[in-house]
Image (spheres, rainbow, N blue to C red):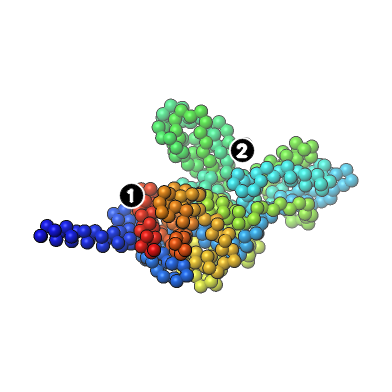
Amino acid sequence: MKFKLIVVSLFLNVSLFASNPLDNFINNPMIQNANVSLLVKELGTNKIISQYRPNNSTIPASTMKLVTTATALELLGPSFCFQTKLEIDGTVNANGVLNGNLYIYGGGDPTLGSEKVGNPNFLPQWVEAIKRAGIKKINGQIVADGTLFDEEGVNPKWTWEDIGNYYAAGAYGISYMDNTYRLVLRSGLIGTTPKILRTEPEIASLTFDNHLTSTEIDSDSAYFYGAPRSNHRIIRGEIPANRMEFVIKGDIPNPSLLLAEHFQNALKQAGIAVSEPPSDIVKRVTERKLIDLHNSPPLSEIIAETNVHSNNGYAEEIFRYLALKSNPVATSNGAIREIRSFWKGKQLPIDQLFMYDGCGLSPLDAVSSGFFVELLTYMKTKSSSSEAFFNSLPISGKTGTLTHFLSKTPLQGKVHAKSGTISGVKCYAGYIEQDNKTYVFAILLNHFNGTSKAVTKKMEEFLLQISNSAK
């Protein structure tokens, strides 16, 4: 009888523990010492399903993109297009000679030449625009004018390990080819230094100190280091041995000038000569005439790429552009003021939002789960751009950064959310749609023990238990 009582007691204790998903989650050895902020609410009733320190601001990583993209949709609208202008100063004579400069006036479009969204082969269209303007020769320069944005480019709150790499590229008035180049290497035996073959695209002024090592790893573990706008890069780390070609990616130091160079080459191939080398320096303010207007795809498409694939470059361009609502030049600080002002006006708890960039790469960023849940609730129930925002989110087990999250579980296809991952940080925020109900959630973990993969598994288990208990 005593043995049966012990068994029953143990069973009841285990059942009680298992029936409390929150305790089960936060008391896990990997998570019990972590900085956690968590909130799950039922949309409509506002019923709290689970919460743990919902007002605690924690590093959000890429879930910060939710703040950037939601604000952009509210301030600009889903049909907004970034505009790049082709302008001339001087005059075009009867022989088709432009005595003056041709300007590319950047409008912060992240899709020029991008592999992700829009037309990467747009330069022939620009050449045709020059022909339509009757220009057959240019006595002057092609000037890439990126002065709509300030000269900061790379966010000063990012870490040295990130700056110089493709995922930490600068945001400029003119962005081009995702502000990313590929460095093609050939690796030899283990312990040897890989040989640099070329860059794609070619950037003649770019130089490298190569400290890479060929090792037995099977993935990219290489990092670029270099100051913003500098044409010199140091490469450290490892790449797989014995590869005929292996590609790593860095940031283009001066995408504005590279675009001007490529445009000049395209004009030359079309028989339109330009007398002087291209430049990204606007030497004087002159009256200009618009000869062509290049529109980006609509913001809804750009934001979908930003959130589904967690595109840092797109996020930073959108983020900086928001400053222009009240400022003549796009700056990070101006963007932060606009974003905070907007959400303060919507009565969101902006004292729980610490924002230093638009993509979440800065380790100084911090947001609470409570702020995220209120933002997500607003976008679902009050925003005129609700559909565009919701459709921009990855789907569990199906798309983007959530392709493997909750895959082959009862929640596959039922979670629309943004993930966030940097070293020691794992976050998810979004919506669960189940049984004709919608739940809004945010789970933010910082400084956990164990691997990111193992912690993700525990987050999946928590959401599955929550969704099951909420039925």
* Residue at horizontal 59 percent and vertical 46 percent from the top: 116
Label 1 and label 2: CA atoms lie apart by 40 Å
Left-right relation of 206 to 9: right
**How far across and down, in percent of the image, does residue 217 sit?**
41, 35
Residue at 55% x, 62% y: name it: 70
Nearest to the observer: residue 35 or residue 381 = 381
Residue 120's quadrant in the figure?
top right
In the image, residue 416 sits, relative to residue 169, either above or below, namely: below
- Mark 1 is on which residue type? Gly
Please tell me which residue is depicted at 18% across the width and 60% down the height of the picture: 8
Which of marks 2 and 1 precedes in the sequence?
Answer: 2
Q: Which residue is mark 2?
A: 201
Question: In the visual, does 422 lie left or right of 152?
Answer: left
Q: Which residue is mark 1?
A: 450
Residue 309 in percent (x, y) is at: 52, 50
Quarter of the image with the C terminus in it: bottom left
> Which kind of residue does numbered mark 2 sit on?
Pro
Dots 1, 2 in contact, CB < 8 A: no
Q: Nearer the viewer, residue 162 or 120?
A: 120
Count the labels in the image: 2
How would you rate the neighbour count of disc 1 (Cα within 10 Å): few for under 14, some for 14-19, many for 20 or more? few
Q: Give coordinates of residue 423: x percent, y percent.
A: 41, 50
Where disc 2 sits, the SS reads: loop
Asked which quadrant contains residue 448, the reply is bottom left
Q: Judge depth for marks 1 and 2 and give the one in front.
A: 1
Q: Is residue 439 left or right of residue 100?
A: left
Which quadrant is home to the N terminus?
bottom left
Q: Which residue sits furthest right?
A: 94
Residue 440 in view: no
The x, y position of residue 85, in whole percent, is: 72, 53
